[in-house]
């Protein structure tokens, strides 16, 4: 998962709140991060399942958009604190051949974000705070190696959207033919020292093959996600630990051999501690949406 900024928000109560990746669903009172295409009610008749596999022609390209929104609630020394953060990114992805399958370079060509705190007001961040690309080597079953991540300015140091984004652009596929209702698992881990802090996360994902649906006239395979997440971070005298769940759906485009879209909802609860002060409870609701435009 993607949020590292809890420590910074508790340890820097007199400083601007960092942007956090993540999102909150509108039914929890959170702003919408972005709209996905409507899913048609029709379900494609089931057929003999062929193994799902990533394929991409060298020299081809795709555009993905990512939208996050997040709501965090905690009790600070100043009283209750409510944080609402939104981030949107456009990724221009190019593909080239690689012995493992292909190499995807997802350049961040646009970014904008905002962070609103009940105690500290609103601040915004633009594209000049992010540069570079998510570079990933992808095999038939998914991500093989995360080669690089975007460069972030100091003000973006606590924004962890890009730490695990490669794993969600190229989620794990089963290395065999599976029928609806069958499951497979993987584990995503990352660690970072960006922004002067230190953080790490472990996400154990269980995928279950769902139904085929029609989106914008295209037949897509639903892959249902259920994951557990553990996260810890530290900055200065502040420390944060939390755990929770992430659930949602990936929509796989077999014709393109790539992810078409995803919607992932996260719910976490944990503690933040600064210096000798007693720990305070932190709760987070988050929503991430990913969709391919071409």
Image (cartoon, rainbow, N blue to C red):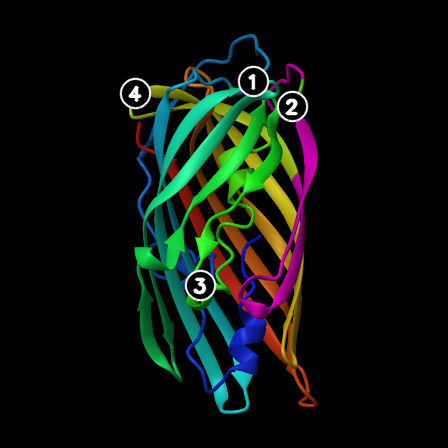
Spatial CA distance of label 2 from label 4 is 25 Å
Residue 96, x across and y down, in percent = 46, 22
CA–CA distance in space, label 4 to label 3: 38 Å
Work out whether mark 2 precedes mark 1 in sequence or the reverse, and give the earlier one. 1
- Which label's residue is closer to the chain start, 2 or 4? 2
Residue 283 at what x, y percent from top left? 56, 69
Nearest the camera: 84 or 133? 133
Instruction: State how far apart marks 3 and 1 are (Cα).
Output: 36 Å
Cα distance in 3D space between marks 2 and 1: 7 Å
Residues under labels 4 and 1: Cα distance? 20 Å
- Label 1 element class: loop
Q: Does the residue at mark 2 contact the one at mark 1 (Cβ under 8 Å)? A: yes
In the displayed image of the protein, which residue is found farthest to the top? Answer: 48
Between circles 3 and 2, the one closer to the viewer is 3
Residue 177: within the magenta?
yes
Disc 2: which residue: 174
Picture residue at 67% right of the left edge, 82% below the top: 279
Q: Categorize mark 3 by other alpha carbons within 10 Å: few (<14), some (14-19), many (20+).
A: some
The residue that label 3 is drawn on is 156
Disc ID at residue 217: 4
Q: Quadrant of residue 8?
A: bottom right
* Rendering coords of residue 216 (x, y %): 29, 26
Mark whose residue sits in front, 4 or 3: 3
Vertical order, 100 against 148 (above or below): above
Is 214 displayed left or right of 136 in the figure? left
Which of the marked residues, 4 or 3, is nearer the chain's N terminus?
3
Q: Name the residue under label 1.
A: 52
């Amino acid at each position: 998962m993607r949020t590292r900024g809890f420590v910074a928000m508790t340890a820097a109560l007199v400083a601007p709140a960092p942007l956090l990746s993540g999102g909150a669903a509108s039914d929890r009172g959170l702003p919408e991060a972005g709209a996905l295409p409507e899913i048609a009610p029709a379900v494609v008749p089931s057929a003999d399942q062929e193994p799902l596999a990533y394929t991409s022609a060298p020299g081809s390209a795709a555009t993905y958009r990512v939208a996050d929104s997040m709501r965090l609630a905690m009790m600070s020394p100043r009283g209750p604190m409510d944080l609402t953060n939104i981030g949107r990114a456009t990724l221009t992805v190019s593909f080239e051949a690689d012995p493992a399958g292909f190499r995807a370079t997802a350049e961040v060509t646009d970014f904008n974000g905002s962070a609103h705190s009940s105690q500290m007001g609103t601040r915004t961040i633009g594209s000049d705070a992010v540069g570079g690309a998510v570079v990933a080597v992808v095999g038939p079953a998914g991500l093989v190696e995360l080669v690089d991540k975007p460069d972030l300015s100091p003000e973006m140091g606590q924004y962890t959207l890009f730490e695990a984004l490669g794993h969600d652009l190229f989620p794990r596929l089963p290395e065999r033919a599976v029928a609806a209702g069958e499951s497979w698992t993987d584990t995503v881990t990352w660690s970072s020292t960006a922004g002067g802090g230190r953080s790490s996360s472990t996400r154990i994902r269980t995928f279950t093959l769902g139904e085929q649906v029609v989106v914008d006239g295209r037949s897509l395979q639903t892959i249902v996600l259920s994951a557990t997440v553990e996260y810890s971070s530290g900055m200065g005298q502040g420390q944060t630990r939390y755990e929770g769940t992430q659930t949602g759906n990936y929509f796989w485009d077999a014709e393109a051999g790539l992810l078409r879209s995803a919607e992932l909802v996260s719910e976490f609860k944990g503690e933040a501690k600064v210096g000798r002060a007693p720990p305070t409870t932190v709760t987070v609701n988050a929503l991430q949406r990913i969709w391919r435009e071409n």
